[in-house]
Amino acid sequence: MTANLFDVLRARRTIRRYTPEPVSDEDIDALLEAAMYAPSRMDRRPWRFIVLRDQALQQEMADALGVRNYLAEAPALIVVCADPAASPTWMMDISAATENLLLAAADRDLGAAWVGWPESAWWQPVEALLRRRIGVPDDIRVATVVAVGHPAEERAPYTREERFDVTLIHDGRWGNKRLP
Ligand SMILES: Cc1cc2nc3c(=O)[nH]c(=O)nc-3n(C[C@H](O)[C@H](O)[C@H](O)COP(=O)(O)O)c2cc1C
């Protein structure tokens, strides 16, 4: 495990190819634990999680979204759901949780991919599918799906030069930019 936060931040890349090796319950629980340390408005914690290890259903989800087969091939999916009645800021709250989850995956050398666009027509079929097939209630939103597995592709960690873009920063007043 990596000790340095910035090493983990830079190493977190979206991984869409996985070996067939299962992801252990211990790893899944560590990811979920990390997710649940996230901040949320008024500490409402509107996130709910479904752990899926069901290749047939995963294939149906990949087909419903028309995405490449990483959803079907991942040894596990973590479906991040939200209870909108618990918090109107559920989309932001679950995003914080999802990022924590991805960072924990990177820290454990697992590969993960975040998939989701809850307010789009594209997303509706997968939400309907999960209601129909595994009983997600009508008042719970399916917010994101995170594919998790042992990486079968390597992606280089980010560097500071690549990502730290001073032109995106305004000092004290919009338009006051630092010299690059
Ligand atoms: C809200 C959100 C939705 C995403 N949806 C998808 C998706 O549907 N399919 C996919 O392959 N990647 C998806 N991604 C991953 C992004 O494509 C990826 O984070 C981006 O290309 C940057 O690459 P990196 O994660 O390696 O830094 C999503 C990421 C976020 C934050």
Image (cartoon, grey):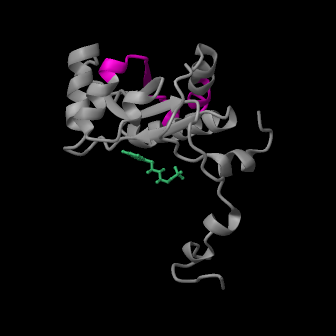
Q: Nearer the viewer, residue 6 or 85?
A: 6
Q: Which residues are magenta?
A: 33-57
Tell me where residue 6 appears, x and y as whole percent. 73, 50
Above/below status of 111 relative to 11: above
> Would residue 27 be found to the left or right of residue 77 on screen?
right
Q: Quadrant of residue 122?
A: top left
Tell me where residue 27 appears, x and y as whole percent. 62, 21
Looking at the figure, which quarter contains the C terminus? bottom right
Q: Nearer the viewer, residue 61 or 90?
A: 61
Tell me what residue is drawn at x 45 percent, y 26 percent: 78
Tell me what residue is drawn at x 62 percent, y 29 percent: 34
> Would residue 106 be found to the left or right of residue 115 on screen?
right
Q: Is residue 60 magenta?
A: no
Q: How many numbered marks does the figure carry? A: 0
Looking at the figure, which quarter contains the N terminus? top right
Residue 38 is at least partly visible in this image: no
Above/below status of 93 relative to 128: below
Tell me where residue 173 appears, x and y as whole percent. 55, 79
Tell me what residue is drawn at x 79 percent, y 44 percent: 4
> Would residue 109 be found to the left or right of residue 94 on screen?
right
Tell me where residue 55 appears, x and y as whole percent. 37, 20
- Furthest-right residue in view? 3
Q: Is residue 34 magenta?
A: yes
Q: Nearer the viewer, residue 72 or 99?
A: 72
Q: Nearer the viewer, residue 23 or 123?
A: 23
Residue 56 is at least partly visible in this image: yes
Tell me what residue is drawn at x 43 percent, y 17 percent: 53
